[in-house]
Image: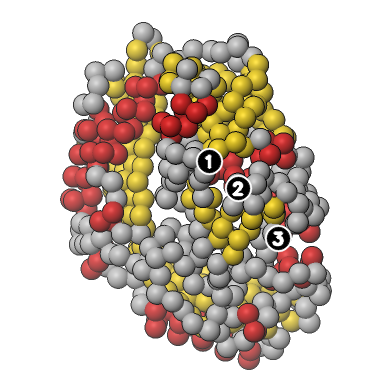
Amino acid sequence: MNAISERKALDKGELESIVRMVLDEAKSRGADQAEVAASHDIGLAATARLGEVESLEYTNDRGVGVTVYKDQKKGSASTSDFSLPALKETVAKACSFATFTAADECSGLADAERMATTIPDLDLAHEWGMQADEAIRIAIECEDAGRSFDARITNSEGATVGTSSGVRAYGNSHGFLASYPKTSHSVSCVVVGEENGSMERDYWYTTARDAAILESPVSVGTTAAMRTVARLGGRKIETGTAPVMFTPDTARGFIGHAIGAISGGSQYRRSSFLLDAAGEKIFPDFVQIQERPHIAGAMASAPYDAEGVATTDRDIVVDGVLQGYVLSSYSARRLGLATTGNAGGTHNLIVPGNSGDLESMIQEMGTGLLVHELIGQGVNMVTGDYSRGVVGFWIENGAVAYPVHEVTIAGNLRKLYQQIVAIGNDQDLRGGIRCGSVLVDSMTIAGA
């Protein structure tokens, strides 16, 4: 197979030409407003299991989505066929669908004055140029490192190497039209360990825009094996209350529930445990949550949101106080507010720490539960009630005592957020929320 870099996605000019043509077609069919998003992505993924190639996948995905507004009625349609007849038919379908929907005074494009006027280069595209044989070699190397780490590693769910590159283009009838390329690369591994008749599995992964800054395959496989071996010999613990600390990869989701609760959709639907909470102190004084959309090379960076609105730095939580909501133009209108440039989601949320790394925070906790993995979906976003299965470690005298399993932690997020006593400086940079370990003073723990 040829290198990915030799199988190019459509360039920015080609996608923008398609968007422009679709917008013109929508105008000719009488749409009051229209917006078009087009994308083209090419990828390669190889999975190795037990030293053999399990799968090799090449992807070539593209699509165009068009939304039209007529008399405040909305119609949408999409296609993966970039031929002129297919694109015209897609516009016709969108216009037809708009005749069947109810008028909504809040519908329509974001305000024209909010459109991005400059498109900064955020360094989001770094081609890997990886060929299939190289991907296979890396996957096998990664899995071999995990399988050979310890005699207790007896099986594997495989190691996967993936790379993708693509272009996104967006335009609307305000005259806005822009595009940018981006890439994503990853290496992951899952292994299984066994000891005294019990089995455990764990994983590790690395992901980045630039393959040059990925962790090495050996490091990924070894870390997956270390995590798996550490979980062997898990015990049950007594039911009670104790401090609970979330590792950075689990803390990301814990904090993320607050972001979901302050999203515009949750607010205008009146289905949020942080309903009308702007201006309220929902975290302790030391907690800040910052949105920084323009971090070079970051996984959630974007020069504009899904509506073409310019993205800007913003402080969502200052000294524990919620400053506002996460809004698209539609949800903002429903609430009588202005868009925050978050159509399609947030862009690089940063939660600065007030403590040290994980090891020092374990010492600070003294005794309690360290959460390594969360199980289940026990989060009620209306009431804030929180109940999750946990795999992790019991901490005594500031050190890991033993692994635990069949444990559930519970509480109400409104109260739990107020009980955060420390946030680590060990930020996980692999996702859209950059947060370190989070220590909660007390939670209900259901064990044996």
Residue 439's spot in the image, x, y percent? 56, 34
Name the secondary structure under disc 3.
Answer: loop
Residue pointed to by mark 2: 287
129 vs 276, nearest the viewer: 276
Q: Which quadrant does the C terminus fall into?
A: top right
User: Dot 3, crowdedness within 10 Å: few (<14), some or many (≥20)?
Assistant: some
Which residue appears farthest toward the top when viewing the image?
196
| Mark 2: secondary structure | loop
Q: Secondary structure at mark 1?
A: strand
- Distance, label 1 to label 2, CA atoms, is 8 Å
* Nearest the eye: 243 or 41: 243
- Which residue is under mark 3? 324
* Closer mark to the observer between disc 3 and disc 2: 2
Say which mark, if any, is on residue 415: none
Residue extending farthest bottom: 28
In this view, 442 is above or below 152: below
State the residue in front, 443 or 181.
443
Instruction: Please give the residue where the numbered disc 1 appears in the rendered image.
Output: 423
Residue at left 35%, top 59%? 209
Q: Position of residue 229 (x, y in %)?
A: 34, 22
How many numbered discs, if any? 3
Considering only order in the chain, which callout, 1 or 3, is on the residue closer to the N terminus? 3
Hey, what amino acid is under mark 1?
A: Ile
* Amino acid identity at mark 2: Val
The image shows residue 191, relative to residue 331, as above or below, that is above
The answer to the question of whether label 1 and label 2 lie on touching residues, with beta carbons closer than 8 A, is yes
Residue drawn where x is 69% and y is 89% of the image: 30
Question: Where in the figure is residue 427, as x and y percent of width and height?
Answer: 44, 46
